[in-house]
Image (cartoon, helix red, strand yellow):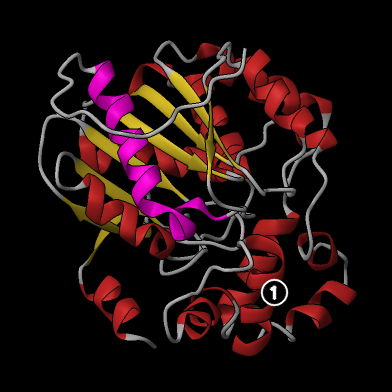
């Protein structure tokens, strides 16, 4: 375990929600609250740099979904409906009746859409980092499609020791010239594939409802959002198809598309750029605009 992960754990908090224990990091103060939600093969730990930057201006909260990372495992299946149910009650517990800004990475977007279906009043804005929404047509990227296979996926997951994790992330999820901090691969192994966490990670990846019924519910939730929304995609991210991005734009009625200098893990690869753009977005929403940034924003209609 690296000093970075140890610091992450020591500075973490715990919230008991419906009998389950949520691990989360909370930093900063302010009227505006930002929620950072992780996706596949990531946890709140991957947001550590973004959390640090945004906490200079906002109250920032980054939880681990139940069964993933350092949060407890419920008896129910680790489905996106279950995640959305507990996430809403988690937000009620830690933010009371205040509305929040949400940052969704990857699989967190469908989860957030289920929450929006019943509780759109809770969300002010949504920022989407390399996300996807049309689950029936989502192509599970490597190694997710292997990990989803019965038996073979279980055997394959035992290869996910630190050296293999390091190789996998560098080959498929980050740019070639990106360098992870020392012992980062050991941290991810500890959080996602060590002991019982391995089975939970596999179940989280496998329990994706790709039915048309689930798609209708996700679409209803996405369309129920009243606040602003924006999309971020990595300039070299081939994990998310152009179809998915266009589908998000059409469903959520947004043309705001920002291109980041990264592959699939923007919170790790370009945390400063991500933080600045989210800060500008929230600042614009609140009509404060207290700071100007020098970055090039690419919009595609």
Q: Is residue 54 magenta?
A: no
* Residue 262 % position (x, y): 56, 52
Nearest the viewer among 168 and 45 is 168
Between 298 and 80, which is closer to the camera in this rendering?
298
From where the camera sits, is residue 275 visible? yes
Question: What residue is at 39 percent from the left and 53 percent from the top?
Answer: 271
In the image, taking residue 243 as reference, residue 31 lies left or right, namely left
Residue 193 vertical position relative to residue 47 in the rendered view, above or below: below
Residue 283 drawn in magenta:
yes
Q: Is residue 87 left or right of residue 29?
A: right
8 vs 170, nearest the viewer: 170
Residue 120 against residue 264 in the figure, above or below? above
12 to the left or right of 127: left
Query: Where in the figure is residue 116, as x and y percent of width and height?
Result: 49, 23
The residue that disc 1 covers is 168
Expressed as whole percent of the image width and height from the top left, the position of residue 94 reads 23, 43
Left or right position of 126 against 197: left
* Location of residue 287 by image quarter: top left
Can residue 99 be seen from the camera position used here? no
Q: Which corner quadrant holds the N terminus?
A: bottom left
Residue drawn 29% across the image and 84% down it: 3
Q: Quadrant of the C terminus?
A: top right
Q: Which image quadrant is residue 202 in?
A: bottom right
Taken as a whole, is the magenta stretch helix, strand or loop? Answer: helix
| Above or below, comparing residue 161 to residue 202 in the picture | below
- Magenta residues span 265-285
Q: Residue at x 42, y 78 (%)?
A: 181
Q: Which residue does the image show at 23% across and 24% down from the upper left?
A: 283
Secondary structure beneath disc 1?
helix
Q: Percent x, y for residue 224?
A: 52, 12
């Amino acid at each position: 375990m690296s000093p970075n992960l140890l610091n992450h754990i020591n500075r973490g908090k715990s919230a008991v929600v419906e009998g389950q224990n949520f691990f989360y990091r909370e930093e900063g103060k302010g009227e505006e609250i930002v929620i950072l939600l992780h996706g596949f093969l990531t946890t709140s730990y991957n947001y550590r740099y973004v959390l640090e930057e945004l906490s200079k201006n906002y109250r920032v909260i980054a939880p681990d979904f139940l069964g993933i990372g350092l949060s407890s495992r419920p008896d129910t299946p680790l489905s996106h409906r279950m995640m959305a149910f507990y996430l809403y009650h988690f937000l009620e517990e830690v933010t009371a009746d205040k509305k929040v800004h949400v940052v969704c990475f990857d699989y967190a977007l469908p989860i957030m859409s289920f929450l929006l279906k019943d509780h759109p009043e809770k969300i002010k804005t949504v920022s989407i980092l390399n996300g996807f929404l049309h689950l029936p047509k989502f192509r599970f990227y490597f190694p997710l499609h292997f990990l989803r296979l019965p038996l073979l996926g279980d055997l394959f997951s035992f290869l996910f020791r630190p050296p293999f994790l390091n190789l996998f992330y560098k080959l498929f999820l980050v740019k070639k010239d990106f360098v992870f901090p020392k012992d980062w691969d050991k941290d991810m192994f500890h959080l996602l594939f060590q002991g019982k966490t391995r089975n939970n990670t596999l179940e989280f990846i496998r329990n994706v409802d790709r039915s048309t019924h689930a798609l209708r519910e996700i679409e209803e939730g996405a369309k129920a959002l009243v606040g602003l929304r924006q999309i971020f995609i990595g300039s070299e991210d081939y994990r998310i198809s152009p179809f998915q991005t266009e589908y998000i734009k059409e469903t959520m009625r947004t043309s705001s598309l920002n291109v980041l200098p990264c592959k699939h893990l923007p919170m790790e690869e370009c945390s400063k750029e991500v933080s600045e753009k989210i800060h500008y977005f929230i600042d614009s929403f609140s009509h404060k605009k207290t700071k100007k940034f020098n970055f090039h924003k690419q919009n595609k209609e």
